[in-house]
Image (cartoon, rainbow, N blue to C red):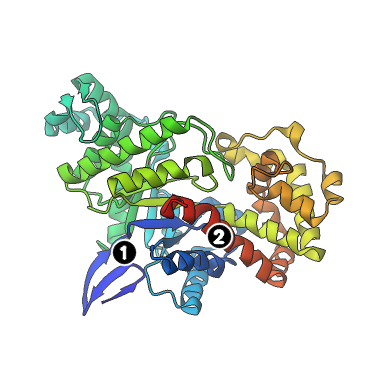
Amino acid sequence: MRSIRGETVSGSAIKGLELPKFSIGVGDRFAHQAKAQLAACIKAAEVGIDVIPVWNKSNREHTIIGSEPAVTRIAADAAVKELGWTKPYFLDADHINLKTVGRFLDSCEFFTLDVADMIGQPAKPEDVAAFLTAHPELVGTVTIPHINEPFHTDKAFVEGVANKFLAAVQNAAEIYQLLVKSKGEGRFIPEISMDETDYPQTPIEMLIILAMIADARIPIQTIAPKFTGRFNKGVDYVGDVKQFAKEFEEDLAAIAFAVAKYGLPANLKMSIHSGSDKFSIYKAIHDGAKKFNAGVHLKTAGTTWLEELIGLAESGGNGLVVAKEIYAEALAHMGELTLPYATVIDIDQSKLPSAAEVNGWTSEQYTSALRHDQSNPAYNRNLRQLLHVGFKIAAKLGPRYLDALVADEEIVAKNVTENLWERHIKPVFLGL
C-alpha cells in the first residue's frame, strides 16, 4: 500500500482522500521554502509522529503577489521528490468561495470553504422549519458526553442558530457540489471555516452547525470554529488561556458527539486558523487533543515569510539591505497594508521604530526585533505585525527579493525549518 498526495491506494482501488490525524498548514508566500518546511515535518517523522504538510495560500495572497496555485503545486511536488517524502501531503485552496474557487481546481485537493459573508444572513423560513422538524433531539435537554452540564434549549434558540448559520452551510454545500462536479467525489478534502464571526460558538451551537453540515451531505474533515480571544497575525494569543482550553475541549466533545450521532467522517478534526505563534495556547491544544485522542490542523500561514526576512537580515550584506528597505516601505504604506487585516492586527504606531533608525540597525538588532522570542527585550510585536502584512512590498521588489532568497538560501531555510519544528510542531504535536 502506498500514498499519493494523501490518497489511500491498494491495487487499483482508491478509497478517497483522507487527512491524517495531525497536519500543519504551511503558508509560503513566494513558493521558495517548501523544502525547508517539509524538513520540519521530516524531523517529526524521525521521532515517531506524522505531521502532514498542507501548503496553503489564499486567493488574496495570489492576487497580491501575482502568482498562481500551479506555482505552489510545482514547489511542493519538487520538495517532496527531492527530500523523498512518502507520506501524504496536500495543497489548500485557502478561504475560497464560489467566485474564487475556479483558479484552484487543477492544483489543489484541500479546500477551505469560506462562508463568512453568509453567516448571519437568514435562511429561507421553510428551510429553517424543515431543519427544526428533522432535529427534535436538539430541542430540550441536550447532553454531550464529556461536558459536565447538559444544555437546555427551546425551539426559539435552535431557530435562532439556524437563522444565523443555515444559509452559510447551504452556501458551503453549493461550493462543495461544484467541487464534486469538477474533481469527483472523494477526490478532495473539504474544510468549513466558521471563525469569521463576532462571538465564539458554544458547544450546543457547534452541535447544531454540525447537524446542518451532515444534513447538507458535506463530508468535512476539518472545521475551524471561532474561539475567545485575539488571534492576531504572527504574534501570541491575547486572551484568557483557561477559557480557551475550556472552549477547545468542549468543541472537541461536540465534534466527537456529532461524528457518532450524524455520521460525519470519523477523522473530522479541529482546524486552528491564524494558529502561527499562538505559543500560550499550544499546551492547551496538545493536552486537549491528547485527552480526546483527537486530530488537529494548525494553520501557520505567514510565519514563513517573516522567517525569510529574519534569514535575510541575519545574512547581512544585501539581504540586510533588502530587509531594511522592506520595513521602510511597509512603514510608509502602513495604512494600505493593514486595511485588509484590520480585525486581526493590533499595532501601536508609537512603538514602531522610524525607517531611519532601522536603517542604522545591525543584523542582530533587526532579527532581535522581528524574531518571536518574547524573552528578548528587543522583540517588537508591533514591528512584527506590520511586517507580517508587508509581503506586498517584497512582491513589488520582484526579482530583487527572490534573488536575495536564493543567494541566502541556506540561512533562510535554517530559520524556516527551526521555526516550524521548535516553535510549532514540538509544542503542539509532541507536547515539548
Evaluate whether residue 322 shows in this view. Answer: yes
The residue sitting at 49% across, 69% down in the picture is 76
Q: Amino acid at mark 1?
A: Lys
Circle 1 SS class: helix
Q: Relative to the observer, which residue lies in front, 307 or 183?
A: 307
The residue sitting at 32% across, 59% down in the picture is 19
Few, some or many residues within 10 Å of mark 1 (<14, 14–19, 20+): some
Disc 1 target residue: 183
In the figure, 285 relative to 127: above or below?
below
The residue sitting at 71% across, 63% down in the picture is 401
Disc 2 target residue: 28
Q: Amino acid at mark 2?
A: Asp
Circle 2 SS class: loop
Q: Relative to the observer, which residue lies in front, 191 or 38?
A: 38
In the figure, 357 relative to 182: above or below?
above
How many numbered marks, from 0 up? 2
Few, some or many residues within 10 Å of mark 2 (<14, 14–19, 20+): many
Lateral position of residue 322 relative to residue 153, left or right: right
In the figure, 359 relative to 146: above or below?
below
C-beta proximity under 8 Å, tags 2 and 1: no
Q: Mark 2 or 1, which is nearer the eye?
A: 2
Quadrant position of the N terminus in the picture: bottom left
The residue sitting at 69% across, 57% down in the picture is 309
Separation of residues labelled 2 and 1 (CA atoms):
24 Å
Lateral position of residue 258 relative to residue 71, left or right: left
